Amino acid sequence: MKFILTIHALTPWNIVKKIQGSTDIDIAPEGERATRDSIPLLHPLSITHVITSNLKRAASTGKIITSALNVPLLSDARLNECRFGSIEGMVASEATPYYRNIHGPTKDERLDCWHLSYTEYDFHPFGGESRDEVLTRLFNFLNEWTEKFPKSAPLVVSHGCILNTLIAHLGKPPTLKRGEYTVIEYNSQASLPRGAALRGD
């Protein structure tokens, strides 16, 4: 089935390039305006539901969209951003040395070194999550929704790291940016990361 993916609106921490993760920051006035301006792009997509993470920045973005599209709004914690632990609140240049000290240099120095282009990362040393944990909860959500509402076309309003992690795992370029959307065709046969398991939580 079809899922439409988009990243939440701009926040004050996005403006100063701080890593947010699970830190619950609401959207900035600029983000609210940009979301309203983007509504015409969403009308042709036949969206049936809007599902957000339960962090304020995604929920606020979803409220703006649903008020314009007149579709149901739901939230699910499994769509929350990856937890980055103690490096939340830092800018990437501050976080990079901490990550390199534990994990070593990245495979491609052209990429943001603290997430390795979404194909492998582990923030456990900082009290955060690993890529496999992020993908496992995402697949739990996707499989549950696909089973319950197979003919729906939901818009998922979530976060940059978690959505690009999913996109990369499905074999597409992880290049989704704020103000854009992408459409994925998903079925429950999509493979989980090695060693991960579906849970009923």
Image (tube, rainbow, N blue to C red):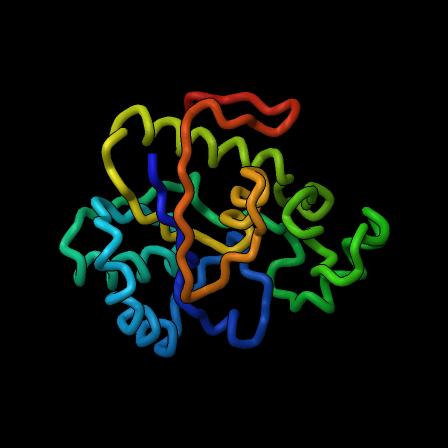
* Residue furthest left in the image: 70
Q: How many marks?
A: 0
Instruction: Please state the horizontal and vertical placement of residue 138, each as a whole percent of the image.
Output: 47, 36
From the viewer's side, name the closer residue of 18 and 165: 165
- Is 36 positioned to the left or the right of 81 in the image? left
Residue 135 placement: quadrant: top right
- Is 107 positioned to the left or the right of 121 in the image? right
Q: Is residue 148 visible?
A: yes
Residue in the image at 27% along x and 29% along y: 150
Residue in the image at 27% along x and 71% along y: 36
From the viewer's side, name the closer residue of 32 and 5: 5
Q: Is residue 73 visible?
A: no
From the viewer's side, name the closer residue of 181 and 165: 181
Instruction: Please state the horizontal and vertical placement of residue 30, each as a whole percent of the image.
Output: 38, 78
Instruction: Please state the horizontal and vertical placement of residue 198, each as a whole percent of the image.
Output: 50, 22
Residue 27 placement: quadrant: bottom left
**Quadrant location of the C terminus in the rendered image:** top left
Residue 123 placement: quadrant: top right
Decide: is 101 above or below 194.
below
Decide: is 142 above or below 10.
above
From the viewer's side, name the closer residue of 151 and 164: 151
Residue in the image at 73% along x and 67% along y: 94
- Is 123 positioned to the left or the right of 45 in the image? right
**Quadrant location of the N terminus in the rendered image:** top left
Residue in the image at 63% along x and 50% along y: 85
